[in-house]
Image (cartoon, rainbow, N blue to C red):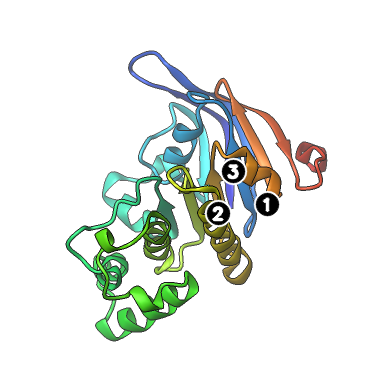
Amino acid sequence: MIKLQGVTKKYKTGVHALNKMDLSIEPGEFVYIIGPTGAGKSTFIKLLYREEKATSGNVIVDGVDVSSIKNRHVPYFRRKIGVVFQNYRLLPRRTVFENVAFALEVIDTPKTQIRTRVKETLRLVGLEDKANAYPHQLSGGQQQRVAIARAIVNSPKVLIADEPTGNLDPSTSREIIEILMKINKEHKTTVIVVTHDITIVEEYKQRTITIADGCVSSDTMAGGYDYSERN
């Protein structure tokens, strides 16, 4: 599903965000990405959905070398990937239903399909009773659920959650992780969670990749053994 082969990313400022990174994530995996601030985590995920391009090496997502995609084709490629951000990025003047539906409207999905798929997705994240509410009427946890719904309503193969619990209290953070795990289990979606919340990582054990100084410094499975020993 995802493979990085000797990937280096050097910004114009001279900063080496990634240094010859090698990494593989299989279809249907649930993976945490952890590491200190400035380690390269954000650059890693930006390479996956082509917000940034690698300086060298190969970034393969669903069989496609992301760096080789022409700019005009990037929006079509991104339909395979759902992204959830820490600050929700909801449209304030649209209802919950309209926020989720927007992801389908921009790709010209028929209205009858939009209604069905949005209702199903809101049910999945537990917000079917909030369809007509506006973002300012929701709690932080509810807003993040809307963001998740919007990210998955198009049935992406990969869901990237960038600090999805960063603004939430511990109880709500657990609810969000449980929703992400439910999506992973029921829809076989590959889920990548970038987080600083080590409590969540330890409580909901999954494969955990630590990035430090632009490289993979450790890669362990839920049982605690080294993932690299399997390869």
Q: Residues within 10 Å of mark 1 (few under 14, many from 20)?
A: some
- Residue 152 lies left or right of residue 184; in this view the side is left
Residue linked to disc 1: 204
Q: Quadrant of the C terminus?
A: top right
> Is residue 166 or residue 21 the one in the foreground?
166
SS at mark 1 in the image: loop
Which one is earlier in the sequence, the residue at label 1 or at label 2? 2
Question: From what the image shows, is residue 215 above or below residue 32?
Answer: above
Residue linked to disc 2: 171
| Distance of label 1 from label 3 (alpha carbons) | 24 Å
Question: From what the image shows, is residue 126 above or below residue 194?
Answer: below
Which one is earlier in the sequence, the residue at label 1 or at label 3? 3
Residue linked to disc 3: 3
Residue furthest to the left: 93
Residue furthest to the top: 14
Q: Residues within 10 Å of mark 3 (few under 14, many from 20)?
A: many
Q: What type is the residue that disc 1 sits on?
A: Tyr
Question: What residue is shown at x 65% (from left), y 53% (from top)?
Answer: 26
Residue 185 spot, x, y in % from top left: 63, 66
Residue 70 spot, x, y in % from top left: 32, 45
Q: Could one spot residue 206 in this view of the protein?
A: no
- Residue 43 lies left or right of residue 201; in this view the side is left
